Amino acid sequence: MNTIWLSGTIVGAVKPIALPDNPGAQLRLAFSNGGGAGFTDVTVFGPQAERARLLMPGTKVAVAGRLRFSEWETSNGDKRQSLSIVAGSLFELTALAEAE
């Protein structure tokens, strides 16, 4: 499996995902994209999700995981696609920077 690493800043509130046996969380990450900004959704599970739920917008993080491709059709018949990340690891960078 290929792993993607991405660092950026959390934008918006981290949303809990209610699963019976495996807690989850979803967050939106803003990252630098060749002079502009890019955004992607990140989903984490287990202990990583429990930690992610404590993070606030503006927190800098790094994630490592796999890409998830989604494709759907709107009610108007328009085709849509998106890429998101299912993270196996999440690291808070803001706390590291403040400790230095």
Image: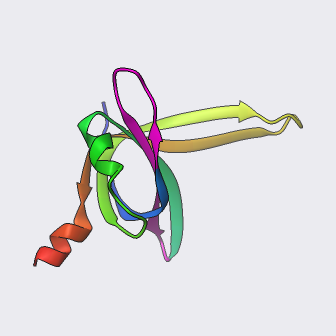
Identified at 34% across, 67% down, the residue is 59
- Helix, strand or loop for the magenta stretch, by majority: strand
Q: Is residue 96 above or below residue 50?
A: below
Q: Is residue 12 left or right of residue 47?
A: right
> Is-magenta flag for residue 56?
no
**Image position of 4 (left or right of 92):** right
Span of residues in magenta: 15-35
> Which residue is found at the position 10% from the left and 78% from the top?
100
Asked where in the image residue 61 lies, by quadrant, the reply is bottom left
Provide residue 88's location: percent of width, then percent of height.
Answer: 28, 38
Residue 27 lies in the magenta stretch = yes
- Regarding residue 88, the answer to whether it shows in the image is no
Q: Is residue 1 above or below residue 42?
A: above
The answer to whether one can see residue 6 in this image is yes
With 71 as the anchor, is 46 left or right in this view?
left
Of all residues shown, which one is farthest toward the left? Answer: 100
Q: Position of residue 47 (x, y in %)?
A: 24, 38
Give residue 49's position: percent from left, percent from top.
32, 41
